[in-house]
Amino acid sequence: MDDNKYVDRTGSSKGIVVTYQGKQYKKKVQITINPSVMRDGGEFTSSKLIHKLERCVHDYFGLKYNLNDFNLKRMILMADIDVSSQEKVSAYVKVLQRIGKVKGFSPSNNECLNESASFCLDGNSNGVNFLIYDLKEVLANRIKEVETNRKKLKSIIENSEGILRAEVRLTEAKSIRAYTDKIDTSKQIAVLVKNSQDIFLATFVRVVPLGDFYKKDTATKIIQKEVQDMTLRRRMLRLMELIPEKKSLLLAQKALNYRKIDDVMEALAKINVSPITISKRHDVKHLKCLYSYLDDENNDDN
């Protein structure tokens, strides 16, 4: 607690944290909810979440506030991608970092994440952030800083081996409005929860190209074998060369100077080859397309 801010974590075991912030001209009450804690292993539906959240707000504030008195300003959509080993987690992070800048997003440094174990992008003007990181690394660092719930964190860390966590964060009111035209907070949450997988993937596909990751020589051989159109093949190979040179997928696409760049990306996806190649310095030779790990069961919302 500081002079103007107080965080009440007494409800954290139920998935709710309340922050009070006093300013010179205005006082603010903020609620942070964690649906995965609120559902406590039960069936997850938007109606049940809203009902549980409304009950929590009522139990905490009584008649002073209800859920619709609060404005929804932020939502985090998460997917825990089990790639089976810590070595693969590290390999995926390294190859994804080579994506660099993409259309509508720029690289950012998240102060809570180790730069070498994460790849983070901020939307240039859309209020959307994209993060993908080594979950075990993040939790291990957090346990060093937090003494409370230490045993619980240790247990979670033990189960985070080989997990690559991806997040799409809606961080502004306009990013919320982009996905729902509802005005009531309860209805906004219901719509966003119902469409969470589509919202998550809408950003994920803008950042991570479809296709398996290979060393450059292997990717080149596959393209030469599978693509009969010589002009298209030449552009695919050139894009692949430009990405490490420009240190950015977006800058490489611009340098290719081809107005039908989507045709090039679609052709690569069709043969399941990512234009992002694995660095010569890395021992791993092949990584499966991340989309092959994503399914309905490993998506979560916060």
Image (cartoon, rainbow, N blue to C red):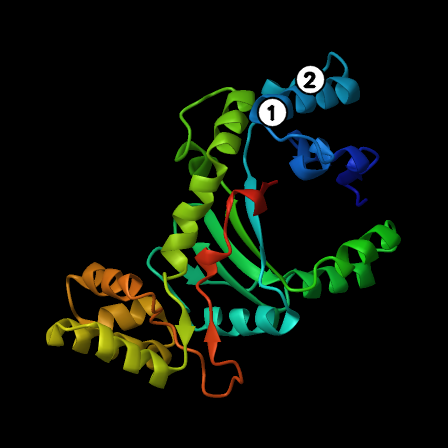
Q: Which mark is residue 65?
A: 2
Q: Residue at 46% across / 34% down in the picture?
A: 195
Image mark for residue 70: 1
Would residue 7 appear left or right of 258 to someone viewing this image? Answer: right
* Marking on residue 93: none
Vertical position of residue 103 compared to residue 243: above or below: above
Q: Secondary structure at mark 1?
A: loop
Residue nearer the viewer, 55 or 71:
55
184 or 294, nearer to the observer: 294
Left or right relative to 44: residue 224: left
**Residue 20, position as x, y percentages in the image:** 73, 34
Whole-Å distance between the Cαs marked 1 and 2?
Answer: 8 Å
Circles 1 and 2, Cβ within 8 Å, touching? The answer is yes
Look at the picture and state if 276 lies above or below 72: below
Kind of residue at disc 2: Tyr
Instruction: Please tell me which residue is depicted at 23% across the width and 73% down the height of the picture.
Output: 226
